[in-house]
Amino acid sequence: FPHGRAYDRVLALTRSGTTTEVLDLLRKVAGGTRTTAVTADPDTPVMEAADDVVVLDYADERSVVQTRFATTALTLLRAHLGLHSDAVVADARTALAEPLPEGLVECGQFTFLGRGWTVGLANEAGLKMREASLSWTEAYPAMEYRHGPISITTEGTATWMLGPAPEGLAEQVRATGGLWVEGGLDPLAELVRAQRLAVAVAAARGLDPDQPRHLTRSVILAS
């Protein structure tokens, strides 16, 4: 982290409020840059480490894999920017109710694509798939996909677009034999669908999506 730079504010997202790297950063910039933490647990050290704290305790979860806190924090940001709407809520309900695309769970590789702000969502979707179902997943800006990554696309792979796709990309993916998933809902709702896919793939493989191997709920390093 570039401590020497000037910032208006440092915003830390930490569901557990105990992650060592986050706490260390907040302490290093204390007194020079104002800090705000968003957390799900008010009984943790982050309450003292940050100048201001937003507590989303209703978004806490027992699972090691973060789903509810991640989507809640993003919803908070969108609401703050005036980008939350009844249509977004309706899409989220649809994402929870509709079945996943046929053949998707059986795929052996998953690539998530985004444009603009949804590139971050694509990375988050890929991370949830890796954590919960131990799947081979990748994520890219959609405009980069044709410049190399599409070479791994074939029958038995899936490419999921979060948001509007570049012209012609869907046809190119289908031509490889891979499954193309057009994200027609609000991108945040599409992230929820990807979370559901992670659970479904984990179940199909006999895995516990809440307790992945090698992971803990919070990364606490020895001092």
Image (cartoon, grey):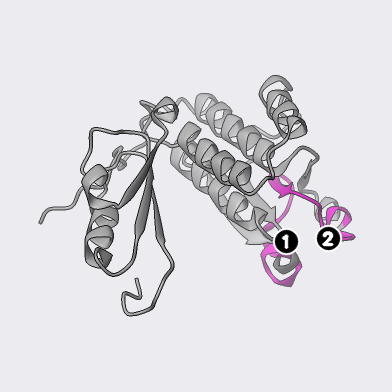
Q: Which of the two residues, 12 or 7, is positioned nearer the viewer here?
A: 7
In the current view of this chain or complex, which residue is farthest to the top? 97
From this view, report whether residue 27 is shown above or below residue 148: above
For the point 57% across and 45% down, the residue is: 125
| Label 2 – label 1 distance at C-alpha | 7 Å
For label 1, the SS is helix
From this view, report whether residue 195 is shown above or below residue 223: above
For label 2, the SS is loop
- Residue 131 screen position, x and y as percent: 44, 41
Q: Which quadrant is home to the C terminus?
A: bottom left
Question: Magenta segment: does it hold 146?
Answer: yes
In the current view of this chain or complex, which residue is farthest to the left? 223
Report the residue marked by disc 2. 166
Magenta range is: 145-171
Query: In which image quadrant can residue 103 be found?
Result: top right
Q: Which of the two residues, 61 or 198, is positioned nearer the viewer here?
A: 61
Question: Magenta segment: does it hold 37?
Answer: no
Q: Which quadrant is home to the N terminus?
A: bottom left
Image mark for residue 67: none
Query: In which image quadrant can residue 191 be found?
Result: top right
From this view, report whether residue 144 is shown above or below residue 177: below
Amino acid at dot 1: Ala
Number of on-image labels: 2
Amino acid at dot 2: Pro
- Residue 32 screen position, x and y as percent: 28, 70
Quick check: can you spot residue 106? no
Quick check: can you spot residue 216? yes
Q: Is residue 107 left or right of residue 8?
A: right
For the point 81% across and 40% down, the residue is: 184
Image mark for residue 142: 1
Cβ atoms under marks 2 and 1 closer than 8 Å: yes
Q: Is residue 90 left or right of residue 34?
A: right
